[in-house]
Amino acid sequence: MLDAIFNRLQSRIGVNNMAYFFLLPNMLIFGIFVLFPMLLNFYYALTGGTNLFPQDRPFIGLGNFETLFDCENFFDPNSCREDRFWRAVFNTTFFVIFQVGFMVLFSMITALILNRNIRGRGFFRSVFFYPVLLSPVVVALIWKWILQRQGVLNGLLSKFEIEAIPFLLDPTWSRFWVIVISVWALMGFYTLILLAGLQSIPGNLYEAGLLDGTSTWQQFRYITLPLWMPTLFVVLVLSLIRAVQIFDAVFVLTGGGPGTANLFMVQYIYNTGFSNQVQIFGLSAAASVVMAVVLLVFTLIQLRIGQDSGSA
C-alpha cells in the first residue's frame, strides 16, 4: 500500500524532489515551534502596552531597547532605569565565567582520568554521566534538601558543633552553591564529549612519542592538546550557551534570591513577561533579543578562534 503511494508520488514530483517531501514534516515542526515564535518575539520587542494579542499592541520601534539601555553608568545597576535587567546581566556574566571555566577544567581532568586503563572504568563513566539523566528540577530539589538550614549538610556540621550556615540565604554562599550544583549536574555530558575526542586520537602518535623519549607532560602538550582542541571548542561553545540560558534549577533552588543575588537573564525575562503583576511582554521580548544577539556574537567569535587555531 505504502509502496504504491510513494511510487505514484515519486512519478509526479520526481526522484530529486522526494527528499523535500521527507523533510517537510520536520520543517513544519521547526517553522511552527521555532521560527514562528522567534519572529513573533522580535515583533513583540518592537511593540508596547500590556495587551497579549499582537493586533492590540502599539508599535513603538526601539522603545523597549532604549528602556533597557537607559543608564547613566552601565557598571552601576542603580543608575539604570531597568536596574533588574543589569543586575541579571552582571549575575549571568559572573556565573558564565566561573561555571564554564570550572566546567571545562573538571571535564578535561575527568576525561583524561577515565581515558586511562583503570579498574572499573565503565562504572565510573556511568556514575559521572548519571546526573545528566536527572531533571534539573529534581537536581535542584535534592540539593535544596541538602543545603537548607535544617538540611543534611547542616545536620552533619552540627555533629562537629559547627553552627548552621544559611547556604541558600547568604548571597555569597548561594552563588557558590549554584555554580557547584550546575557543574555537578552537567559535567558528565561534556566529559563524555571530551572522552570521545580523546579516543579519536591515534595511539601510534603516543607510541612514536615514547620512542622519542617524550615525558607525559610533553605528550599532553604537543599531541593530546592540539588534536583535542576542536572538541574543546565544541564543549566551550555548548557550555557557554547552556550557562547563559540557566533558569530552571536556580529558580527551584533559590528563586533568584536572596534578593537579586541569583537573578539571571532568563529568569528576568520570565519575571518581566509572565510572573510580575504587570506583564511587560515587549520589554521581556527585547531582553531576549539582546541575549540572543550576545550569544550569537560570542559563538561566532569562539568559532573563529577555533578555526584560526585549527588552521595554525
Image (spheres, rainbow, N blue to C red):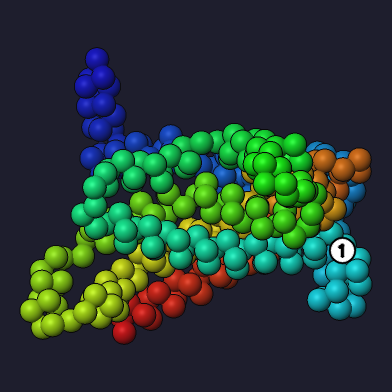
Q: Is residue 56 above or below residue 296?
A: above
- The residue shown at (74%, 67%) is 90
Along the line of sight, which residue is nearer the eye, 214 or 140?
214
Residue 232 lies in what quarter of the image?
A: bottom left
Q: At 67% from the left edge and 66% from the top edge, which residue is drawn?
A: 94
Residue 248 percent coordinates (x, y): 65, 43
Q: Is residue 151 left or right of residue 305?
A: right
**Residue shown at 55%/58% (left/top)?**
241
Residue visible at 40% across and 74% down? 306
**Residue 110 visible here:** yes
209 vs 157, left or right, is left
Work out whether 98 lies above or below 153. Answer: below
Can I make out residue 256 in this image? no
**32 w.r.t. 87: above or below:** above
**Dot 1 corresponds to which residue?**
83
The residue type indicated by label 1 comes to Asp
Q: What element carries label 1?
A: helix
Report x, y in % for residue 171: 78, 57
**Label 1 Cα crowd, 10 Å radius (few <14 / some 14-19 / many 20+):** some
Quadrant occupied by the C terminus: bottom left
The x, y position of residue 192, in whole percent, is: 36, 51
**Horizontal arrangement in the rendering, residue 80 relative to residue 216 (left or right):** right
Q: Nearer the viewer, residue 6 or 191?
A: 191
In the rendered image, residue 219, in percent from the top left (x then y), is placed at 23, 76
Q: Quadrant of residue 291?
A: bottom right
